[in-house]
Image (tube, coloured by chain):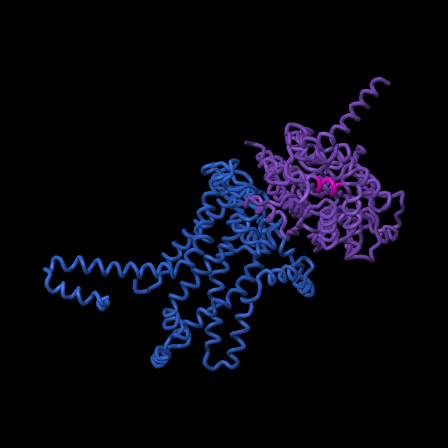
């Protein structure tokens, strides 16, 4: 009883303290770094740069910027970048970065290391309001840098027409690797492959996680690519590819697994929730459902998460206004508006739950948030990953060996950590 | 100069009286003042062009050279305190340290090397042949053929490459056509095997001999000799087709400068058409052949757009120019990217000098 009281008091006082301190002094200790906010909260001119997935996102972001600007008495100019990461880099190199911008978790370390990011996150909310995996994805050197904007998780999409035609029922849903193998076999026939999966670590990594494997150790200090769990997972994928019940998109002349799935060349696919919009706009006639990724042989659940945060540039003169804007953007109401507009999953647990309740079709994607694994953010990793991705097609033809591939990935990645 | 106004009269009279030793310096001074004025106007006239060159060419090149010796990430000012001078580290990572960076650079150089040695001779020959065809006095509809042959050159290379990617995709038009005659075409763009290794393996040679395992730039000799991939062959054909039109114009202009007398004289001497081409036309075209080959050579070492479209996730299609871009913008290793660019620059200079040494401009030398 007493213990609970103390915890309650601590929690309550922290909850009170955070906004209190934020309003009085604008200083909050976030891990090792203390950030002081500056500039007026009214009459500030902010710029927001983002890479849009389409008109729906463009409209929603512009509307949000206009609404907040009007309500708070600030002005936000929104820049939609056609080549986002290049334009963002140019902004920083030229000394005129946008105040607020999208930032992928895979680039956090690169930007944080250069001192380009304002570690403002704890001004906005307590980390417990967000999914822990997302907070972890934006924490570097024990400092929580930016507030997660939204996320997308991988799930397994099933063409329900083909499913029924193959005589499969709900009892056969691929909840385990064994069932996935059996289902893919039954669904494969002339011109249709059971499962299509993107030939990249960003899809295959889900199987690592399901088998209890990982990219890095828990502390994030060492890579664990060539662990026995990962090797076994890759061998499992290879065995399906060799049997012809799993295909990679280039084998089916598709740009991505969603295309093969939408064109009816594959009965199942593993993509993130971005596939919902693509299916609705490009392949509206296909009937499909999403289920969570299967569990590995030991019952471990696993999937991958792809996420962006709202980055604030360290160079900004109006950090106080910028943080207020991000507060607005990451409020439950605004996150739900974004989710409804272009199908991303809200990063706030409360908002995500509300969204999943209203849209049962996304439940399979949201479900993974508890155990999803983020992308590697080590500086220089894209090239290392590309070298691995290049070999994935070889798994199907037999020219690539899972053990060699993972050993190479491990040694190339380890080279990045060497000073 | 000699007719400078007014003061000239007085000067003349001065000169008449003055001893010769005094004459020259005064004249010189005035002359140089006038020349200085002229020089000034000259500089003023060229200054806009010069300013553009300095701002957009000279300074960026010097800056890039500086960056190639730093660890700049491209997301701060290149002069920020976090940017350190790292000496030759970037060059060492690419050239001497075994690892991914070296292997990627080696692969890119190999890909581009095959591209160059196939494209340059073939496009030069094709351009010359087309020029001779459309230069024919008796050809009807010359204008049409000249336009038709030149047309691929004015079309956007990104658009043409995209069309080629569709045509040559695994289930594209080319493979459909091949399937009618019972041939199963490869996955052209994504097949990772070189054409020479594919040929050898069809002859029963699957494994490299032991000497071919020696590594140069992170790539075994076997890999160096693998030849261009099928995708690269597609791009080679595309490049020959699209650029030969431009070079055809070069040859056409040169052909029209050759006087008909020379040709007629050789005809009178009983030369066959081939002899006339080989011993009369071609030697007269020699400077243009050299120009076209040099331009082609430099251009082909810088191929970027085709690689930009087919390069991601496709190591046999990456060229050094694209690699420099990729390393810089997706890996944020601008120092390494700049180093690749300068290595490519050095490679082009050296190889062009070698080429000029072997193909002399003037036969008499």
Q: Is residue A191 visible?
A: no
Q: How many marks?
A: 0
Quarter of the image for residue B161 reads bottom right
Q: Nearer the viewer, residue B155 or A348?
A: A348
Say if B194 sits above or below B4 in the image: above
Quarter of the image for residue A316 reads top right
The image quadrant where one finds the C terminus of chain A is: top right
Image x and y of residue A217, in percent: 68, 30
Tint of chain A: purple
Q: Nearer the viewer, residue B210 or B300?
A: B300
Say if A413 sits above or below B263 in the image: above
Q: Residue at x 63, y 42 (%)?
A: A385
Residue A351 is inside the magenta segment? no
Image x and y of residue A67, in percent: 74, 48
Quarter of the image for residue A99 reads top right
The image quadrant where one finds the N terminus of chain A is: top right
User: Which residues are drawn in magenta?
Assistant: A324-330
Image x and y of residue A88, in percent: 61, 46
Q: Is residue A230 visible?
A: yes
Tint of chain B: blue
Image x and y of residue B1, in percent: 24, 66
Q: Nearer the viewer, residue B251 or B35?
A: B35
Q: Is residue B125 left or right of residue B237?
A: left
Q: Nearer the viewer, residue B296 or A144?
A: A144
Q: Residue at x 66, y 60 (%)?
A: B166
Q: Residue at x 46, y 65 (%)?
A: B124
């Amino acid at each position: 009883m007493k213990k609970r009281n103390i915890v309650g008091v601590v929690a309550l006082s922290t909850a009170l303290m955070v906004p209190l301190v934020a309003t009085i002094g604008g200083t909050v200790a976030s891990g090792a770094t203390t950030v002081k906010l500056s500039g007026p909260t009214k009459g500030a001119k902010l710029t927001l740069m983002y890479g849009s997935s389409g008109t729906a996102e463009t409209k929603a972001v512009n509307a949000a910027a206009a609404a907040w600007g009007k309500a708070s008495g600030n002005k936000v100019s929104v820049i939609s970048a056609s080549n986002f990461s290049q334009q963002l880099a140019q902004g920083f190199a030229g000394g005129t970065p946008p105040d607020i911008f999208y930032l992928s978790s895979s680039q956090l370390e690169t930007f944080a290391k250069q001192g380009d990011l304002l570690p403002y996150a704890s001004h906005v909310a307590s980390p417990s309001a967000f999914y822990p995996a997302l907070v972890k994805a934006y924490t570097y050197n024990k400092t929580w840098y930016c507030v997660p904007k939204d996320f997308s998780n991988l799930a397994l999409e099933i063409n329900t027409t083909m499913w029924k035609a193959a005589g499969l029922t709900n009892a056969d849903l691929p909840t385990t690797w064994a069932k996935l193998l059996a289902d893919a076999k039954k669904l494969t026939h002339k011109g249709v492959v059971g499962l299509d999966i993107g030939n990249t670590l960003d899809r295959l990594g889900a199987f690592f996680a399901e088998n209890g494997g990982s990219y890095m150790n828990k502390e994030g200090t060492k890579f664990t690519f060539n662990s026995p769990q990962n090797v076994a997972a890759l061998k499992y994928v290879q065995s399906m590819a060799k049997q012809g019940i799993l295909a990679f998109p280039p084998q089916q002349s598709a740009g991505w697994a969603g295309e093969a799935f939408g064109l009816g060349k594959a009965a199942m696919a593993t993509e993130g929730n971005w596939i919902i919009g693509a299916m609705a706009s490009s392949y509206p006639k296909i009937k499909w459902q999403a289920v969570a990724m299967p569990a590995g042989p030991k019952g471990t659940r696993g999937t991958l998460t792809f996420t962006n945060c709202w980055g604030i540039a360290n160079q900004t003169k109006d950090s106080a206004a910028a943080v207020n804007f991000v507060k607005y953007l990451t409020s439950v109401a605004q996150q739900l508006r974004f989710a409804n507009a272009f199908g991303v999953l809200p990063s706030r647990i409360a908002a995500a739950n509300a969204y999943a309740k209203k849209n049962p079709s996304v439940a399979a994607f949201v479900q993974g948030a508890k155990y999803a694994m983020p992308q590697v953010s080590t500086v220089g990793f894209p090239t290392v990953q590309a070298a691995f991705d290049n070999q994935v097609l070889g798994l199907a033809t037999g020219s690539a060996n899972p053990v060699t591939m993972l050993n190479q990935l491990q040694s190339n990645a380890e080279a990045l950590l060497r000073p | 100069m000699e007719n400078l106004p007014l003061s000239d009269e007085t000067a003349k009279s001065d000169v008449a009286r003055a001893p010769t030793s005094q004459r020259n310096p005064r004249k010189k001074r005035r002359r140089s003042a006038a020349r200085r004025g002229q020089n000034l106007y000259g500089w003023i006239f060229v200054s806009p062009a010069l300013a553009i060159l300095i701002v957009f060419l000279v300074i960026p090149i010097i800056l890039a050279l500086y960056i190639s010796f730093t660890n700049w990430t491209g997301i701060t000012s290149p002069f920020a305190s976090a940017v350190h001078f790292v000496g030759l580290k970037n060059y060492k990572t690419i050239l001497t340290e075994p690892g991914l960076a070296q292997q990627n650079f080696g692969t890119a150089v190999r890909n581009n090397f095959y591209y160059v040695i196939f494209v340059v001779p073939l496009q030069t020959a094709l351009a010359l042949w087309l020029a001779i065809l459309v230069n024919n006095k008796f050809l009807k509809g010359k204008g049409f053929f000249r336009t038709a042959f030149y047309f691929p050159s004015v079309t956007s290379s990104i658009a043409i490459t995209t069309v080629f990617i569709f045509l040559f995709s695994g289930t594209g038009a080319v493979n459909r056509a091949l399937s009618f005659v019972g041939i199963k075409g490869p996955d052209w763009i994504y097949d990772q095997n070189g054409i020479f290794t594919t040929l050898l393996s069809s002859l029963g040679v699957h494994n490299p001999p032991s000497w071919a395992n020696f590594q140069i730039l992170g790539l075994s000799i076997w890999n160096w000799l693998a030849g261009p991939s099928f995708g690269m062959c597609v791009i080679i054909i595309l490049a020959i087709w699209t650029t030969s039109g431009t070079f055809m114009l070069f040859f056409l202009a040169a052909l029209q400068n050759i006087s008909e007398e020379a040709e007629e004289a050789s005809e009178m001497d009983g030369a066959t058409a081939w002899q006339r081409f080989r011993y009369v036309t071609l030697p007269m075209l020699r400077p243009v052949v050299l120009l076209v080959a040099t331009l082609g050579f430099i251009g082909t070492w810088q191929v970027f757009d085709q690689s930009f479209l087919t390069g991601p996730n496709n190591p046999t299609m990456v060229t050094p120019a694209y690699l420099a871009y990729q390393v810089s913008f997706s890996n944020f290793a601008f120092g390494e990217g700049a180093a690749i660019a300068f290595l490519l620059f050095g490679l082009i200079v050296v190889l062009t000098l070698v080429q000029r040494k072997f193909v002399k401009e003037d036969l008499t030398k």
